[in-house]
Image (tube, rainbow, N blue to C red):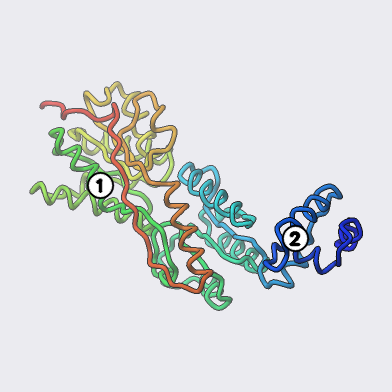
């Protein structure tokens, strides 16, 4: 293993000078730093990260806890986090909660035991007002940014989130402008704030249009394609006069659309379908999906900006970013009775 002493001998300087040069200390000239770095590279020197962490009190590690990398919503958020972390000299450790509270708690504990300098967490939502894992974060004092909406158990942390109420409101207004009046809504999890906000946006748009919110047109969806299929079958049996479906996310919308097409219904001639999220599949589905494009990369950037503020000892405010309605072929004028 190459040591600082080996570099010092080759460069004909002291070990202290080598140490300072490799740490980019200000009292070493640029020319000396470049010469020492060149020798270090030629010798294949690898810094001892663990020893450096002990000296500095910083691990240069960020921990990220999400439900699963298979969830397409996270791809660009994580890309932004990792890119900016790399530029700052940080490594990122990923952990999956699989939407299980006990696995989330274990993941948080493992990352805290690694002494990460900061945590980014997409929470596993639950109805309980407190969660021991999050209380442990507060006790340890680890800077933490919530990726998504806050709930009572994590409301003490800074968050970056999409303005889901406004975005969902725009989707419903789009359907209303096309003449739809019987618009069904496929919900998500009842304990998830993003699901609650999207349902609220739908309700607000209907009320603004002086239409009564009919709870018989609100169906339990979930988060997956399979759950979207089940909701569509339930709708066909209970509310056949519906002319449009507004789904809480793209996967639910795709699952529903597949059922409608198999049942011989045309999209959008017989029924319009909308999603939320603008995942890659939504654009390339056999009937390209009208949906909401969340600012995923920008959410990741905003999360890193919040983290850097926390590391400076500041208290950044929660950020709510606007989303964009993307109109594609899955929506059209309401079918005339």
Q: Nearer the viewer, residue 314 or 128?
A: 314
Q: Which mark is residue 22?
A: 2
For label 1, count other residues whose C-alpha is less than 10 Å away and answer few (under 14), some (14-19) or many (20+).
some
Is 302 situated left or right of 135 in this image? left
Q: In 3D space, how far apart are the residues under numbered discs 1 and 2 (Cα atoms)?
A: 62 Å
Is 205 situated left or right of 9 in this image? left
Which quarter of the image is occupied by the C terminus?
top left
Q: Which mark is residue 218?
A: 1
The quadrant in which residue 294 appears is top left
| Residue 263 picture location, percent across and down | 31, 24
Q: Nearer the viewer, residue 240 or 165?
A: 165
Q: Looking at the image, is mark 1 or mark 2 earlier in the sequence?
A: 2
The quadrant in which residue 117 appears is bottom right
| Residue 8 picture location, percent across and down | 87, 61
Q: Is residue 243 above or below residue 144?
A: above
| Residue 76 picture location, percent across and down | 49, 44
For label 2, count other residues whose C-alpha is less than 10 Å away and answer few (under 14), some (14-19) or many (20+).
some
Q: In the image, what residue occupies the spot 21% across and 43% down?
A: 172
Q: In the image, what residue occupies the spot 19% across and 37% down?
A: 175
Q: In the image, what residue occupies the spot 35% across and 54% down?
A: 194
| Residue 262 picture location, percent across and down | 35, 23
Is 139 situated left or right of 191 in this image? right
Kind of element beneath mark 1: strand
Q: Nearer the viewer, residue 336 or 42?
A: 42
Q: Is residue 102 above or below residue 167?
A: below
Q: Nearer the viewer, mark 1 or mark 2?
A: 2
Which quarter of the image is occupied by the N terminus?
bottom right
Is 285 situated left or right of 204 in this image? right
Q: Nearer the viewer, residue 36 or 77?
A: 36
Decide: marks 1, 2 in contact (CB < 8 A)?
Answer: no
């Amino acid at each position: 293993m190459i040591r600082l002493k080996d570099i010092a001998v080759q460069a004909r300087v002291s070990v202290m000078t080598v140490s300072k040069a490799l740490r980019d200390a200000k009292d070493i000239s640029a020319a000396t730093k470049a010469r020492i770095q060149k020798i270090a590279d030629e010798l294949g020197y690898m810094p001892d990260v663990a020893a450096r962490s002990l000296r500095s009190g910083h691990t240069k590690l960020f921990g990220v806890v999400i439900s699963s990398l298979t969830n397409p919503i996270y791809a660009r958020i994580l890309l932004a986090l990792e890119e900016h972390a790399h530029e700052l000299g940080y490594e990122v450790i990923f952990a999956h909660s699989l939407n299980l509270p006990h696995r989330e708690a274990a993941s948080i504990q493992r990352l805290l035991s690694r002494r990460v300098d900061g945590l980014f967490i997409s929470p596993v939502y639950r109805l309980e007002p407190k969660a021991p894992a999050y209380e442990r974060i507060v006790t340890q004092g680890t800077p933490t940014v919530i990726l998504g909406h806050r709930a009572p158990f994590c409301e003490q942390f800074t968050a970056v989130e999409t303005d889901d109420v406004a975005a969902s409101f725009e989707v419903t207004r789009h359907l209303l402008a096309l003449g739809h009046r019987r618009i069904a809504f496929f919900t998500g999890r009842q304990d998830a704030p993003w699901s609650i906000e999207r349902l609220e946006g739908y309700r607000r748009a209907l009320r603004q249009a002086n239409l009564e919110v009919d709870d018989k047109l609100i169906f339990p969806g979930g988060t997956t394609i399979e759950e979207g299929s089940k909701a569509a079958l339930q709708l066909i049996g209970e509310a056949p006069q519906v002319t449009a479906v507004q789904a809480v996310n793209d996967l639910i919308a795709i699952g529903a659309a597949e059922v409608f097409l198999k049942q011989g219904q045309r999209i959008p001639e017989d029924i319009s379908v909308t999603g939320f999220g603008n995942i890659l599949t939504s654009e390339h589905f056999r009937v390209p999906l009208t949906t909401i494009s969340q600012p995923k990369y920008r959410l990741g950037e905003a999360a890193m900006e919040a983290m850097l503020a926390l590391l400076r000892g500041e208290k950044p405010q929660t950020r709510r970013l606007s989303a964009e309605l993307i109109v594609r072929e899955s929506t059209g004028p309401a079918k005339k009775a």
